[in-house]
Amino acid sequence: MIEPLADTVCAIIPAHEEERFIAEVVHAVRAHVGKVIVVDDHSQDNTGLAAAKAGASVIRHPQRLGKGAAIKTGLRRAAAENYEYFLFLDGDGQHDPSEIPSFVDKVSRSKTDLVVGNRMNNPATMPWVRRLTNRFMSWQIGNLCRHKLPDSQCGYRMASRRLLSVLLQSSDGFAFETECLLLAARNGYSIDFIPIRTIYRAEQSKIRPARDTFGYFQVLSKHLVQRATAEQVQPLPFGGTEVSDQG
């Protein structure tokens, strides 16, 4: 049975060639939330058809636009339908839908703007390269936004509608998760983490190494410059600003 708050939650699942798992994921998610939107990012298989048969509302991109762009397409639909909360998870089965009540309970009790899954409490099943990369990136991004981020790269998240403008400003690619955290922290929104299972299968990653790595560093560089600029401009008591002399 769907809890009252969960009935105001729309799950948004970006998917690219996930025909093998998407129906199973949609079935499991529908048990916990009011609606499921699958955004088919121009799959060449039957991802969209399988998702629709499982009960999801499906939006298909006419060309591949990226994970962040797919999430934002789903967000616009969910916002137009007046959902108050947005749940994000992947369509490849790496996020366990049975943990959705933990996200809903956390938001219900704390009114946190953004709740992120944390896989790093027990990362034994995570490939060691991803584990090390995630720890480094979480440390790096946490320093930049001055917020402790145990798992900055986890795509399993729940956000309040209050965060909508931040979400829609974030990257169109795999850097969506990173930029969402940076923008949320900068704008004073509350961020918290809950422990989730670490699930990895043998499927090939959807990350496009050159393009997505470049996108990540592009986002990081942009926010480094913006923070440095903000730190150089100091407010004065009478309402003006003072640019600090770094030379």
Image: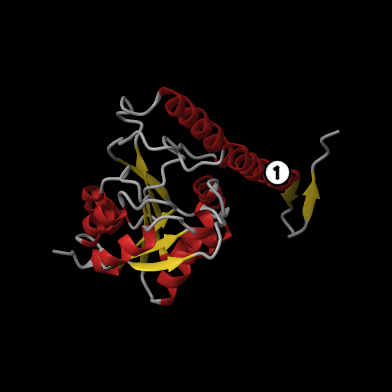
Taking the spot 55% from the left edge, 46% from the top edge, the residue there is 175
Establish if 5 lies above or below 20: below
Image-based side of 90 in relation to 136, left or right: left
Q: Give the x, y percent position of residue 228.
A: 71, 42
Establish if 150 lies above or below 43: above
Depth check: give the residue in front, 161 or 171: 171
Image-quadrant location for residue 56: bottom left
Taking the spot 56% from the left edge, 57% from the top edge, the residue there is 65
Establish if 197 lies above or below 59: above
Image-quadrant location for residue 112: bottom left
Depth check: give the residue in front, 113 or 210: 210
Q: Which residue has dot 1 on it? A: 231
SS for dot 1? helix
Q: Give the x, y percent position of residue 86.
A: 38, 61
Visible in this render: residue 74?
Answer: yes
- Furthest residue in direction bottom, as rendered: 81
Amino acid type of the residue that numbered disc 1 sits on in the rendered structure? Glu
Image-based side of 10 in relation to 79, left or right: left
Q: Residues within 10 Å of mark 1 (few under 14, many from 20)?
A: few
Q: Give the x, y percent position of residue 222.
A: 68, 46
Depth check: give the residue in front, 221 or 244: 221
Way the structure is coloured: secondary structure
Visible in this render: residue 10?
Answer: no
- Furthest residue in direction front, as rendered: 45
